[in-house]
Amino acid sequence: MFNFWIGVLFALVNFGLFLLCYRFFGRMGLYAWIGMATVLANIQVVKTIEMFGLVMTLGNTIYASIYLISDLLNEKYGEREAKKAVWFGFFTLIAATIIMQLVLVFEPQETDIAQGSLQTIFGLMPRVALGSLCAYFVSQFVDVKIYSWLKKKCPGPNQLWIRNNGSTLFSQLLDSVTFCTIAFLGEFPMDVWWQILLTTYLIKFVVSAASTPVLYIARSMKVDES
């Protein structure tokens, strides 16, 4: 149960920092968070843990916050701003991948202690990043489109939970299948791969559903947009 409770704390910390980022930095803070989240999610996903007897990877909590941001931008600033944020996260991940691959090319000095650790984390990153880029690109634009459609069908202020959860229900399934297939198929035994796929989707959706109150709080915030 330790991993479960630390996971709950982890989610609360993520949501709390997200709200502070938006409160202090407004719309620009949302773009900054997306840039950070896309990179951190692809570092965290290298680590596997066990919870309730199932194998899962980290990175799902902070990655789910990206959907929270695209929905918030769509809600308060419109579809165009949400799409701009998607492109920003896409560029951030590509830039981070290229830069870190070049870092690994440098020959380490004899007393260097970082090369092995960096290789372990970022050596897998090209495949993880490719899976993440494909999954991110497809699912985020699908999420934005579905949210915009639901915004027209369910426009009421109290129907925000329908727009939020309705858009992520399908887009996160698409994201999880795409990512796990490209990043992990063949890297793990099939039974482990299926567990990772299942837990990846369930955790992302549960975290997104749990973040609905956070979205309501963020929508009501008065932030400095200067």
Image: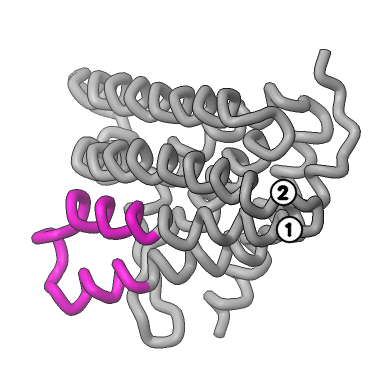
User: Which secondary structure dominates the residues rendered in magenta?
Assistant: helix
- Say few, some or many: other residues with alpha carbon within 10 Å of mark 1 (under 14 / 14 to 19 / 20 or more): few
The count of marks equals 2
Which segment is the magenta one? 173-198
Q: CA distance from mark 2 to mark 1?
A: 7 Å
Q: Is residue 215 above or below residue 190?
A: above
Name the one closer to the observer, 82 or 189: 82
* Residue type marked 2: Pro
Q: x, y percentage for residue 126?
A: 21, 36
Q: Residue furthest right?
A: 222
Q: x, y percentage for residue 207?
A: 58, 63
Q: For mark 2, what is the residue?
A: 155
User: Which structural element holds mark 1?
Assistant: helix
Q: Is residue 91 above or below residue 177?
A: above
Q: Which corner quadrant of the image does residue 91 belong to?
A: top left
Rendered residue at 18%/21% (across/down): 105
